[in-house]
Image (cartoon, rainbow, N blue to C red):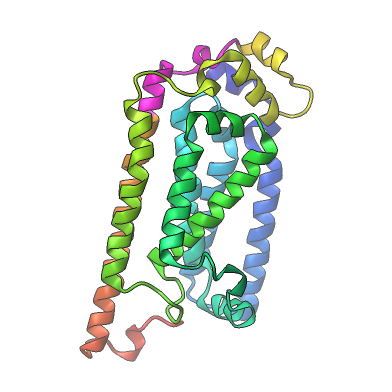
Amino acid sequence: MEMLLTELGFRALWTPELIIALVGVAFIYSWFFRRTNAGPKRKPLFFFLGLAALYLGWGSPLYVTGHVMMTLHMLQMVFAYFIAVPLLLLGIPHAWYEAVRSKLAFKPLRLVWNPICALLLFNGLFSFYHVPAMFDMLMQSPVLHSLYEWVLLFTAALMWWFILSPLPSSYKLPDLRRIFYIFANGLLITPACALIIFAPSAMYATYTDPLVWANVMAYCLPGGAGPELMLSAFGSPESLSIFEARIDQQLAGVLMKIFQEIVYGIAIGYVFKQWLKKEKLQDGELTISDVPHS
């Protein structure tokens, strides 16, 4: 792994085009936030942390090393879909949500804008992504892989929308049902994790077949680095990985399940805190200054 990081250039390791795009998004967000004075000062903090997490998931050295070790690939998934998405949703001011809703009314999304559809779409697509044949095919097709990542990001945003309920005046699940909804997400993702953890052998050609791996690596590097060059320079993924392929695969499944449980546990605490605030407000225990501004 150290040899790979030493030999690869700045563009391959740090994905500067993604940095430029995310910095541009951060600049636009800051400009609009200052101009509209849209909400609490913690909102930009959430949003910028979300952009940083998205960068770790879709760029940074994790992107390249995730093609060598499945454990690091799973860490990418955690950052992109379980950390970045909820932080970005929490970072958008309520007034902006209201402005978009009043103009679009979410009509184009009405077919999928419901909790059951969001639950099944995200967990179904996430599990399907980790079917070995699908995974190896997507990893060898940069266009399809990028498209799948964007679709997965959208469905993750739908799923997290019904967990966080970032717009209080919009349709949302009752608090107790939101907690059950989080548990349902944890249950639906378990089969994919179990498949990865308990498989009797390494399932993914991306991490075991030198030819497939070299082809995958050639796509994620700047032009000119073909599969033959990757094979001659680095040999095979197993020669670069810290762990044997099956152990790496098992650790990847365990890591995903543990981090998912941690994030969902935090989400349950967030929902429970909102629930307590609402109960106190109804009992008259909160003053006007205690009520969060929308």
**Residue 116: within the magenta?**
no
Q: Say above or below: 225 vs 108.
A: above
Q: Residue at x 33, y 34 (%)?
A: 194
Q: Is residue 229 visible?
A: yes
Q: Position of residue 189 (x, y in %)?
A: 37, 45
Q: Residue at x 58, y 45 (%)?
A: 149
Q: Position of residue 52 (x, y in %)?
A: 54, 50
Q: Position of residue 167 (x, y in %)?
A: 46, 75
Q: Nearer the viewer, residue 105 or 110?
A: 110
Q: Nearer the viewer, residue 111 or 291?
A: 111
Q: Residue at x 61, y 12 (%)?
A: 234
Instruction: Judge left or right: residue 82 versus residue 5.
Output: left
**Residue sitting at the far front:** 111
Q: Say above or below: 114 vs 127.
A: below
Q: Nearer the viewer, residue 155 or 57?
A: 155
Q: Position of residue 181 (x, y in %)?
A: 32, 61
**Residue 236: within the magenta?**
yes
**Residue sitting at the far right:** 224
Instruction: Judge left or right: residue 102 versus residue 222.
Output: left
Q: Is residue 269 visible?
A: no
Q: Say above or below: 219 vs 42.
A: above
Provide the major secondary structure of the magenta segment.
helix
Q: Which residues are magenta?
A: 235-251
Instruction: Judge left or right: residue 224 versus residue 61.
Output: right
